Image (cartoon, rainbow, N blue to C red):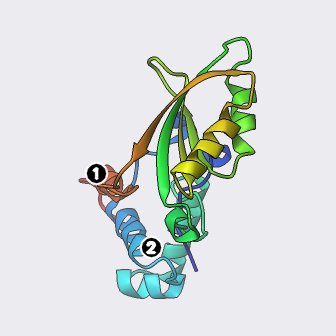
Amino acid sequence: MVRLTNLALDSAVPVSKLPSDIDTLDARLLALLEAEPRIGVLECSRRLQVARGTVQARLDRLAERGVIRGHGPDIDPAALGYGVTAFVTLEIRQRYGHDPVAAHLAEIPEVLEAHTITGSGDLLCRIVARSNADLQRVIDRVMNFEGIVRSSTIIALAQQIPYRVMPLVRASAGGRSDG
């Protein structure tokens, strides 16, 4: 079975290595896998009307290039009891640098992702918590590192557009034939 998922920071693909040569067969394959993550290679080949070896070669190539970053389940934090999502901007002491702060954040299970940003803050984190009171506990844990000076938190009220990449896949495949 093949599964697409969004993985943690340590598996992120550098921008310089991002491919731009997704063709329509790649896009159709990725769309099929997104719609039916538990589908097997043989069934993919049947539905796409291409050889099983072609599907496997495409999957291998997409994984090798970092387009497919994982094969695990896409887990909903709310279903695990973490119904509060917040975005936290952190300002760090520059003498510490980003790496020690990122290492500290990586040890906190509720920190789902962290990005170095421009603007008034240095890092933007997406964190989850079980309640608003639990969010305070998580923020206190985040701030319990002398390399972090200040935080600013925004609580998400509702998700309007879930994490998605298929529009990018379709845009990347625009005009490229199966080849």
Amino acid on which the number 2 mark rests in the picture: Leu
Q: Position of residue 69 (x, y in %)?
A: 58, 57
Q: Is residue 40 left or right of residue 177?
A: right
Q: How many marks?
A: 2
* Quadrant the C terminus occupies: bottom left
Q: Secondary structure at mark 2?
A: helix
72 with respect to 87 (left or right):
right
Q: Is 116 placed left or right of 29 in the picture?
A: right
Q: Are marks 1 and 2 in contact (CB under 8 Å)?
A: no
Residue at the spot 37% in from the left edge and 69% down from the top edge: 31
Amino acid type, label 1: Ala
Q: Earlier in the sequence, mark 1 or mark 2?
A: 2
Name the residue: 74% across, 17% down: 96
Q: Residue furthest front?
A: 133
Q: Position of residue 79 (x, y in %)?
A: 52, 71
Q: Find the distance from the CA under tag 1 to the CA under tag 2.
A: 17 Å
Q: Nearer the viewer, residue 76 or 144?
A: 144
Query: Residue at 66% across / 37% down in the picture?
Result: 140
Observer able to see residue 142: yes
Give the farthest residue toward the top: 95
On the image, the x and y values in percent for residue 1 come to: 58, 80
Q: Assign a secondary structure to mark 1.
A: helix
Residue under label 1 = 171
Tell me residue 51's x, y (percent). Answer: 46, 82
Above or below: residue 33 compared with residue 51: above
At horizontal 59% and vertical 65% (from top left) the residue drawn is 60
In the rendered structure, find residue 33 and report the number of the disc placed on it: 2
